[in-house]
Amino acid sequence: MAKGMIFDIKRFAIHDGPGIRTTVFLKGCPLHCLWCHNPEGIETGFELIARPSRCARCYSCVSACPLGAISKNSGSVEIDRSRCDLCGKCVKVCMYEALEMAGRKINVQDVIEEVEKDRIFYEQSAGGATLSGGEPLGQPKFCQEILTALEERKIPSALDTSGLAPWDILAKTASKADVVLYDLKMIDAKKHKKYTGVSNGLILDNLKKLSGVHKNIVIRIPLAAGVNDDEENIRLTIDFLKPLKTVKNVSLLKYHKGGSEKYKNLGKASCFKIYEAPSERRMEEIRRSFTKAGFTVKIGG
């Protein structure tokens, strides 16, 4: 039975596919989107999360750290992350959950047991389980075994992916999912690399191929003002998607600043760029553009 690295399991999710869902968030992502709201999902290994607002200044963590990476300061504690080896001893003694380890190893059976708890909600809402991240395709065997187990239990499944993976991995994993939620940031390759750290050539090529073999693909477009909500990108996106005969559904996701605090808590505040969300009017204009082009469009997950 495969084991994987996750950073969260969210129950009663309503923005990760149809109906009420349980979303499993896997660690590791090849993209570094400047607006990422799940930065704890980018790195593949464990990370220490520190929440100063919860610190009671008991300083148990200072005593527990064998490397002296944690010290007192006036308002909370200070962590020298260059000295931290992520042993987790500080987390174990923190009674106030001010310290937390992002990432835990888990096997397929444990995931399925969590998902099974809410079966009644899936049945009532046409929901199911979603594999998200990070990038699920970075842990293909783990994902494929989960999706197979879900199919055996007749629990609908969704794969939320950036599409940045070798085609054989995407094809095999997606074939086991009832729905593929395919994230599409922007069409221009230079802009894509500027804002995500990688080119989008493979992402676009994979989407073309996937549309020929999978009949339930939902395109998810996160929109940030001044980044990818301009007329040119919307036009290019529509032009790219229109020839893909099995791609009919589009979800427009409005940018939010939820990742800002998470980056601070990971000691990576400088890695997060704050943008503005498109106005309600602009979101509606974009929705109308896709609708006019023949797509079924939803604002939100």
Image (tube, helix red, strand yellow):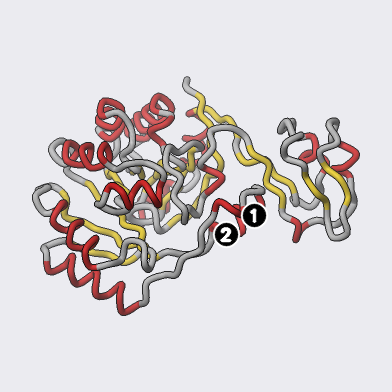
Q: Residue at x 25, y 29 (%)?
A: 167
- Do the residues bearing badges 1 and 2 touch, measured as CB atoms within 8 Å? yes
In the image, residue 116 lies at what x, y percent? 46, 41
In the image, residue 267 lies at what x, y percent? 66, 48
Residue 286 visible in the current orientation:
yes
Q: Residue at x 16, y 61 (%)?
A: 295
Q: Amino acid at mark 1?
A: Lys
Q: Give the total number of marks visible in the rendering.
A: 2
Q: Residue at x 24, y 75 (%)?
A: 285
Query: For this view, does 68 lie left or right of residue 138?
Result: right
Q: Quadrant of the C terminus?
A: bottom left
Above or below, 281 relative to 5? below
Residue 157 visible in the current orientation:
no
Q: CA distance from mark 1 to mark 2?
A: 7 Å
Find numbered disc 2 in the image and state the secondary structure of the residue it sits on: helix
144 and 262: which one is in front? Answer: 262
190 and 274: which one is in front? Answer: 190
Residue carrying label 2: 260
Q: Amino acid at mark 2?
A: Ser
Query: For this view, does 23 lie left or right of residue 82?
Result: left
In the image, residue 137 lies at what x, y percent? 38, 33
Residue carrying label 1: 264
In the image, residue 214 lies at what x, y percent? 18, 39
Q: Residue at x 51, y 41 (%)?
A: 42
35 and 212: which one is in front? Answer: 35
